Amino acid sequence: MKTVLVLNGPNLNLLGTREPQVYGSTTLADLEALCRRRCEARGFALDFRQSNHEGVLVDAIHEAGQRQAAGTLAGVVLNAGAYTHTSIALHDAVKGTGVVMIEVHLSNVHAREAFRHHSFLSPVAAGVIVGLGAEGYALAIDALAARVAAA
Ligand code: DQA
């Protein structure tokens, strides 16, 4: 059974209380439960993580790259939070490992402040899902299932 790594970046631990008008009332635990259900439905194991630290996220992507190369990982669903808009290190980690990564954002970043319009991750993503809330994570898992089935 392949694993999906769902990797969440800074401040996503605050979901549920953080700017509810933007992010809604869904907590990180709710998101994990949703991802777990969808992974079970698609025959995947789930590895769900959150970190506020850029280097920890880089290390997780390196580990994911090794698991992908070994054939035990379907890919990474990455919501890097604000690091999306700043992190060349995360861009390089995805590019350098060749991991299959789907970029997800709960909010529609393109309808928000201009500084959220640029992503360092989109050029190295297999796909991008924005603005669909928690459902975006489930759709990203579906997309990884479709890739695995097609391979
Ligand atoms: C976010 C959008 C980012 O701009 C922001 O910094 C976040 C969350 C989203 O899921 O909508 O932390 O990635």
Image (spheres, rainbow, N blue to C red):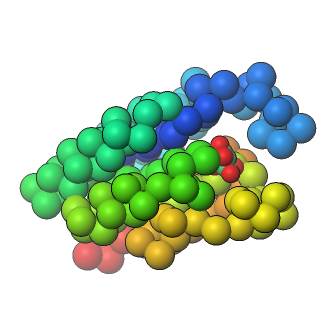
Front in this rendered view, residue 27 or 149: 27
Q: Quadrant location of the C terminus?
A: bottom left
Residue at screen point 84% across, 32% down = 20
| Picture coordinates of residue 93, whole percent (x, y) | 30, 58
Front in this rendered view, residue 16 or 110: 110
Q: Is residue 37 visible?
A: no
**Looking at the picture, does residue 22 appear above or below residue 92?**
above
Residue at screen point 36% across, 71% down = 147
Count the marks: 0
Residue at screen point 83% across, 58% down = 112
Residue at the farthest left position: 70
**Horizontal relation, residue 21 to residue 65: left or right:** right
| Picture coordinates of residue 30, whole percent (x, y) | 62, 28
| Picture coordinates of residue 99, whole percent (x, y) | 28, 62
**Horizontal relation, residue 66 to residue 29: left or right:** left
**Horizontal relation, residue 51 to residue 21: left or right:** left
| Picture coordinates of residue 65, whole percent (x, y) | 21, 55
Quadrant assignment, res 22: top right
Residue at screen point 51% across, 66% down = 120
**Looking at the picture, does residue 126 appear above or below residue 86?**
below
